[in-house]
Image (cartoon, grey):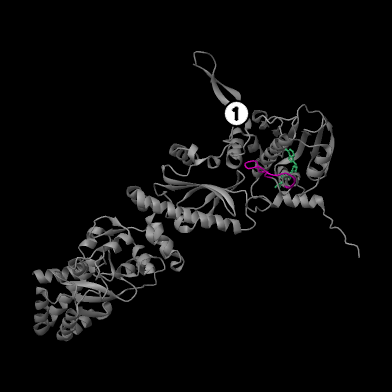
Amino acid sequence: MATKQFQAESKRLLEMMINSIYSQKEIFLRELISNASDAIDKMYYKALTDDSITFNQEDYYIKVHADKDDRTLTIEDTGIGMTEEELENNLGVIAKSGSLAFKNENEIKDGHDIIGQFGVGFYSAFMVADIVTVYTKSADSTQAYKWQSNGADGYTIEPAEKAAAGTEVIIKLRENTEDENYDEFLEEHRLKSIVKKYSDYIRYPIKMDVTVQKPKDEEEKEFEDVQEEQTINSMVPIWRKNKSELETEDYEAFYAEKHYGFDKPLTHVHLSVDGAVRYQAILFIPENTPFDYYTREYEKGLELYSNGVLIMEKCADLLPDYFSFVKGIVDSEDLSLNISREMLQHDRQLKMIAKNIKNKIKSQLKTLLKEDREKYETFFKAFGRQLKFGVQMDFGSHKDDLKDLLLFYSSKEKKLVTLSEYVSRMPEEQQYIYYATGESYDRIEKLPQTEMVLDKGYEILYLNEDIDEFAIKTLMSYDDKPFKSVASGDLGIESDEDQEKEKEEQQDNKELFEEIKNLLSDKVKDVRASKRLKTHPVCLAADGEVSIEMEKVLQQMPDNQSIKADKILEINVNHDIYESLKNAYNSDKDKLKLYTNLLYNQALLIEGLPVEDPVAFTNDMCKVMA
Ligand SMILES: Nc1ncnc2c1ncn2[C@@H]1O[C@H](COP(=O)(O)OP(=O)(O)OP(=O)(O)O)[C@@H](O)[C@H]1O
């Protein structure tokens, strides 16, 4: 049985392609400029083997020219041009890429990678054009040709006049409609910005006649608008340059030019990777937190280029959420692009690049921490919170990547310290890494719960951000040393003797504690004699997974589900107030109730929790004073 070839309804196919491949009309300019760049690259390759051609860089350029009267936009190049046959094959057959064939036939040299591969980019011109006319003359021919099409009814080819080799693509713009303004593609500013956006790093000059103001005479009193030919693209991407040629100022200038931020970057990484996936990248760590950083509006991502042509402005997949503050670009020739060049076909290469980038950022931050503590603290002030979110994210699966990048305030050093520094200072008998939580370092310092641990001479990490304790709970331990809140029931520092004593105290005061618990009903889970309090009369401790600090954070969330910590009221039985409690218990139950309420509310205030009934509380105070 004979195998039949598929037929294609080319008119329909073209229509579908034009209207459904690209998300934005402006892309057509990127495609035509890329074609022009490919055509010049082909001349470059031709010169390598053909002695009669010398490739003088200055002879090769691309020119964009808008004619407002005619409503035409011309993209001209001094590249290799096309013969009649090539015209027929390349612009007459959809999905036929002369450039891909060229790439396969020639050994591609570094830095001269051919962009075209799908054989469809050219037709994107019909997104904005009624008629496209191409004048082209091949470097191998003396005859020039004109190709013309309105997209729907096929095309014509006829001999034409053209002096030099190269190609001119003339786009007759569509009429404006209610929804679409095609005239924008005749505006100097708009054209410049599209070229800058997508084609800034095309390695040949993209020229345009630009309006500039010049003095009319020597006195420079009056000015007039004149047209001046300017090169509007940067051409050589900074990331392709050798690191040794670049100064910090060059990176800073690039950061500013790209509008990555109003600040200066704190540090940068410049990568040129030649592994399984080849890519170049420049990554910046900003100095300041962007104003919208901790909001839903903030979009993470790196600019992604393929062969110097912009593919995505913000490729989110290149950065993990916890490094979402990183700005910069990645350029790779090894990406599998989809046909519109707006997405990637396979994410395998991207995943490899992303993994590599993650590790590079991590090691850059570690180096900063080691070599420039002050700068690292500036970074941590701006983005430390995000790292802590990162620890807690995805069930803690990134905690090993991040644990050595964290800083917490130390009770001993009175400054931010790493976990490794804390552990290195731990006395041999200390089993836990202690932490205390509160709104500010000052408040935490005054917390009664810290007394016993500080008395022991142990260091305490002061956690004052809402995310802190969640991150610590996810970390669970560092260097095999578990974390322990100073507010937890068992601090792990009590001697057997202390524990025995505590049991006795609990027993001795059992009835009084029962009574206090009843008076407070469901507000506390238990009342106990405190082992940690030295000078303060009372404090609250949490029993179970949810700490008091966590309760505060959860209460602020919209879907808090009223999660509360199980609270234990701890009483210092060595405090004078305790005698008063005992007396009241024995002789005056109303007084016991009054004292209990006062002490409980005091404990709430110390913890930074709201007093449930402030009026009752102040009335109680007055009763004591009167
Ligand atoms: N300015 C030009 N000079 C010379 N040849 C050109 C020019 N523009 C297009 N061509 C030829 O026409 C072919 C088809 O162009 P088209 O833009 O449709 O696809 P492509 O560039 O090959 O691939 P892609 O769809 O990936 O951009 C090119 O491969 C090239 O051979």
Q: Position of residue 428 (x, y in %)?
A: 25, 69
Q: In the depicted view, which residue is nearer to us: 28 or 15?
A: 28
Task: Using the image, determine if residue 203 lies above or below residue 278.
Answer: above
In the rendered view, tell whether residue 207 sits above or below residue 593. above
Q: Is residue 198 left or right of residue 83?
A: left
Nearer to the camera, 271 or 590? 271
The percent position of residue 489, horizontal first and vertical second, equals: 26, 76
> Which quarter of the rendered image does ligand 1 occupy?
top right
Quadrant assignment for the N terminus:
bottom right
Residue 109 lies in the magenta-colored region: yes
Compared to residue 182, the image places residue 451 above or below, namely below
Which residue position is annotated with label 1?
A: 230
Main secondary structure of the magenta stretch: loop
Residue 185 in the magenta stretch? The answer is no
**In the displayed structure, would residue 536 be above or below residue 212?**
below
Q: Is residue 297 visible?
A: no
Front residue (pair 383, 240): 240
Q: Which residues are magenta?
A: 104-115
Measured as percent of width and height from the top left, residue 314 is found at 54, 50
Is residue 88 visible in the rendered structure shown here? Answer: yes
Q: Position of residue 103 (x, y in %)?
A: 72, 45
Q: Amino acid at mark 1?
A: Gln
Q: How many marks?
A: 1
Query: Residue 204 vs residue 539: left or right?
Result: right
Identify the residue at horizontal 83%, vertical 44% (top origin).
154
Classify residue 293 as left or right of residue 542.
right
